[in-house]
Each structure stands twice: as structure tokens, then as C-alpha cells.
Image: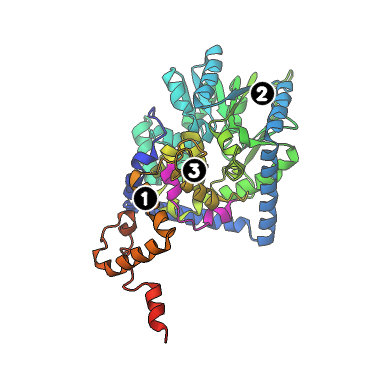
Amino acid sequence: MNQPMHFHPADGFAARSRAAVNDAGQRKNFRGAMDFLQAKRRAQFPDADELAGLRELGATIRRYSLAHLPRLLEQLEAKLTANGVQVHWAENADEANAIALGIARRVEARRIVKGKSMVSEEIGFNHAMAAAGIEALESDMGEYIVQLDGEAPSHIIMPEINKTRQQIAELFVDKIPGVTYTEDVDALILIGREQLRRKFAEADIGLSGVNFAVAETGTLCLVENEGNGRMCTTLPRVHIAVTGIEKVVEKLEHVPPLFSLLTRSATGQAVTTYLNLISGPRKPGEKDGPEEVHLILIDNGRSQAYGDELLRATLQCIRCGACMNHCPVYARIGGHAYGTTYPGPIGAIVSPHMLGLDATYPLAFASTLCGACGEVCPVRIPISDILVRLRNEAQARPGSSDASLRGSGAARTKLVSAIWRGWSLIYSRLGLYRLTSWFMSRGRALSPIEQGAWTRSRTPLIPAPKRLRDLIRERKP
């Protein structure tokens, strides 16, 4: 359970994808799960006009929040501080983990119980705590299952979506003493809850994510279904919340539209079971709640996206997972093939800012550009446009105006550069273009049968026997 969660897709993405595509069982499981989730989402949005209006409202709120992000972050910090919450800023994963570890050591914590938090996955929180001798236990059922199996989540909403109930039953028998084999879903959930229940009371620190942070009131909003998030943020004497800097909104009234979009897009629910609003630690006379509340605001590459007009739209994401559920590529290869914390279309556009384009550029090419992700995105992120931009960045010449991201030009090779220089030369000189096209049409029999990635699933490209200009000349009277 202590292996690093981050891979480098440039080194193995193609191999992992091929392995996943050749796994018939996994493909069947994912296809069934994606069909189920798509149907649930459609049922929650029967009125197309209402959906269009709500999406536009959600997108407007997110764009407005990002346009005023520096001011809102300062306002959020001031309001939270006034409410008794201690605010910390982290530029990267190491700083965020160091802040959390400093808090844990100060209160002499030995166990941290966690609610669901993709940002904590992003920074490798569990592994950083384990290295310091502190247990970090997942309490979300899906996260608990993948942690028990030593895996990373395969989906941002349903981490264990890649597993069947038979696999989970076998895992529980293997990892939990005294458990008997059962494939009954309710019984499996009960087994997990029995293991977790006592941990909440024993934990020194509770850690959570944040779905929305309200600047005007200094409120942290947490969306969940299992109640574990509420347990993590009330029973332990210290609560640490971690989130990216982009999750801030200005007003409490901005939350309901986003909440409605999130729950209906993610799991096909009208509302989730719990919406937790946290504005400070326990006050005198209150019977529950933590003695301390900390918020760690994490950049980790988000400022790079923020600085670009198109790429800034990446930060509009509310982490619903709808783009994954409708992506034909994700449905076939699953989440682990991507090798990053955030898989699927959203992972392809957010991971380059966190890990560098040199480590993640194959993800931008793992798309048909069919646009399904953009059609279902509740906050209208132009994912296909951003994917095309990242593809161009990956092929950009170092030092050119097209190379603006960390790791730009990583996909560019000497052979490809030479080919494009030759193409540019030929197409910029009419005589040379005519001569080259003549040789290509007459020498078509010499065209190679193997043409790299193109011929893995397509027939070879072979020039026509006659050029268009030849055909036109023949048709003249």
C-alpha cells in the first residue's frame, strides 16, 4: 500500500493501454458500469432546456470565480482566519505534505482517518504519512477497498469501479482476519463499515477534501453519501482539509447550482445524502466538532493553467467524473492505464500542469476528439480544444512562442522535425511541389507497408496513380 501512485505515462502508457484493451473481463465490466452511469445521468436531466440553462449558470459561476481568484482567495483566508480556521498555503505536493506532517507531529498523532479526497491522492498524502510512521486510513468505502488492495483509484468518484464483487469478496477474505467469503453487496459493505467504525474514535486527526470553499462566509462545503466525511470532520480533535486553490467561489448562493450539477452528473442522484458546511472549530458550549481546523490550499501546477486564457478553463472542473463516464477511450482502457491520479479526459488536461507535459503528453493523444466529454461537462469545459492545444504544445519547437508549458516539445523528435521541415519546404515552392507530387504518384509502388502508428489499425497511405492536375488536364477538350 506504500508504492508511489504516480507513473510516467510517456514510459508505459501505450503498453498499459494495450494490456487493458486485451483484458476482455475488464472491458465488459467497464462497459456495463459506463452504460449504467450514463443512464442514471440522463434520468436526472429529462428537460434539455433546464439542463442547458443550469450548465450555463454553473459555467458562469466557475468562470467568474476564476476571473476573481486572487481576490477571493485572500477573502477566503481572512474570513476563515476570523472564524478560527488556520489557513496554510502549499506550492507543491511536498510542501502540502510537510505542512500536514508538521501538524500531526505537533499533536503527536499516530493515526489519521480520511474522508474522500482526490487532492490527497494527487499529493501522495498516504505514502508521505506512512514514511513518517503515521497511519492514514481511508474511510470512504471505495477508497478503503483500493487502499486495502494497494492500488490507486481507477475513477475519481467510484475508486473501485474496476473491481467486481467477487474480487472484493476475495480481497476481504485475504486481508481482513475472520471474514468469511460472501458476494452479497450489503454484507460486504457491512464488513467494511465494521472495520472502519472504531477507527473514527481512535483517530487523532481527520482529513477531508473540499468540494467548494465560500469566500464570503469562510465555509468549507463537503459532498458525500456515506457519512464518513462527517465522522472525519467531527470526531477527531483535529480536522485538516486539503484542496486546490481553484475550488473557491464567492458566495454561498453560488453553491446550490454547482451542487445540483455535481451530484446529478456524477452519480445520477438528485442530491447526495450529506452536504456538510464547515465554518470553524468547535465553539464553547458545542458538543461535537474538532478543537482545531486547518485548511491547506494547494497550487501544484494550477497557477500554470491559470496564466493561460484557454487552459484556465481546466480549473472550472468540479470533479464529477461525467467526462470519464462518456469517454469511449476511458471505457475501454479504464483508469489505471492513464497512470495518473486523474484519469480520463479531465486527467489528460489537468495532469500536464501537475506533472509536466513531458511526463503526460501521451494522454492528450489518447482521445478520438469526439467531443462527448465536452457535451456532458456540467460547467462547459472545452476539453477537445484543450486537448488539441496540448498536442500542439507537445510538438512545439523549444523556445518558440508555441512552447509555453513545462515540458513543451517533449513529443518532438529529430525525425519528425525533419519531416515537417521538408513538408514546409515542398509546400512553399510551387515547382518543387509539382516535382515531388509527380515522383510520388509515379513511384507509388515503393510506398512502405508499415507506416508507424497509422498502420496499426488502418491501411497504408499510398499516393494516387495520377495527380489532381493530371486528371484535370486529361479532362480538358
Q: Is residue 92 above or below residue 28?
A: above
Q: Which callout, 1 or 3, points to the residue nearer the camera?
A: 3
Query: Residue 32, image x and y in percent?
Result: 44, 55
Q: Residues within 10 Å of mark 3 (few under 14, many from 20)?
A: many
Q: Is residue 227 above or below residue 384?
A: above
Element type at mark 1:
helix
Tell me the SS state at disc 2. loop
Above or below 372: residue 234: above
Name the residue tied to disc 2: 288
Q: Which mark is residue 250?
A: none
Task: Look at 44% across and 44% down and name the residue there.
Answer: 394
Q: In the depicted view, which residue is nearer to us: 115 or 188?
A: 115
Percent position of residue 188, x then y: 44, 40
User: Mark 1 highlights which residue?
Assistant: 26
Q: CA distance from mark 1 to mark 3?
A: 20 Å
Above-or-below relation of 469 to 162: below
Q: Which residue is mark 3?
A: 347
Residue 149 belongs to magenta span: no
Q: Nearer the viewer, mark 1 or mark 2?
A: 1
Q: Residues within 10 Å of mark 2 (few under 14, many from 20)?
A: some
Using the rendered view, name the quadrant where residue 63 is placed. Answer: top right
- Nearest to the eye among marks 2 and 3: give it: 3
